[in-house]
Amino acid sequence: MKFIISIVTRLVPRSYLHHVSHFFLTFVGLFYLGNRVEDPITGDTFRQFLPYGRMVSRKNALSPSTLSLERHRLMWLYLQRETDFFQAPYKVLHIAPEYCFLKRFKSMKNLDYLTGDLLSPWADIKMDINHMPFESNTFDVVFCNHVLEHIPDDVHAMREIGRVMKPGAWAILQVPMNPGAEKTDEDISITDPKERERRFLQSDHFRLYGTDYSERLEKAGFQVEVNNLALRLSNEERERFAVPAAEMLYIARKPNA
């Protein structure tokens, strides 16, 4: 199973995977039933999660019930425990919406929830993140996870996200990171897919972020909080939800005018 998932996620375009993966994994999940790990998004439990990874397969990563990965489960816990997201009347933009959140956020009566992306079959609006078709100061909350590494000028995209946010609004902007690197490794001139995979973990990435990611967000005009909820979870909760302690949440806030 680990080998099959690794090959499929690496070779099959993600836009195709979006159409069929949830049906396949719902069936596969029947063979993983148990009570050792829990997907906090639904409360479904399994003996373990599925392996996942386009280049390096991670054990116990992918929930068969929601398709959530480690970062998604951590984000859910943050929204649930440290924000009023499930109660406040927010206007939300979700860029490149993840399947594990899509139906749940759309069904929340307190949210005015809109999704946008260039390729995703789930997006309400087809759009380029560099030139979004929204007026300035429109959204209270923005989610944009694992997108900026695909953008040649990521700081420009960050500024565009900031433009459509209201003063005081906040965003969760996750990216692939090398936590052991102080500086982001990037080179937009590299076109060879194998070299991009070697340097940046994926053939369509322009960079692999280091711990200077906060500085890039600040350069784009945000006030940045590096939230360490994963580290503050108990060992039992980290194991239960399969969330690595090193996973930080990057919360970007637009300053009040």
Image (cartoon, rainbow, N blue to C red):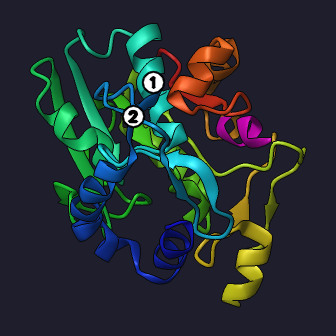
Residue that mark 2 sits on: 34
Above or below 255: residue 39: below
Q: Relative to the observer, which residue lies in front, 117 or 228?
A: 228
As for residue 186 lying within the magenta part, the answer is no
Please name the residue shown 24% across and 48% down the image: 115
Does residue 195 appear left or right of residue 110 in this picture? right
User: Is residue 173 visible from the viewing direction of this image?
Assistant: no
Does the rendering let one see residue 151?
Answer: yes
Kindly identify the amino acid type of the residue bearing the numbered disc 1.
Trp
217 is higher (above) or lower (below) than 61: above
What x and y, as percent, mark residue 177?
72, 49
Q: Over which residues does the magenta segment extend?
A: 212-217
From the viewer's perspective, is 174 left or right of 56? left
- The residue at the point 44 percent across, 9 percent down is 81
214 within the magenta span = yes
Q: Amino acid at mark 2?
A: Gly
Return the residue nearer the eye: 48 or 104: 48
Q: Residue at x 61, y 33 (%)?
A: 221
Secondary structure of the residue carrying tag 2 is strand
SS class, disc 1? strand
Whichever of labels 2 and 1 marks the residue nearer the N terminus, that label is 2
Question: Which label belongs to residue 170?
Answer: 1
Q: Which-is-in-front pick, marks 2 and 1?
A: 2
On screen, residue 228 above or below 98: above
Percent of width and height locating residue 148:
56, 55
Cα distance in 3D space between marks 2 and 1: 37 Å
Q: Taken as a whole, is the magenta stretch helix, strand or loop? A: helix
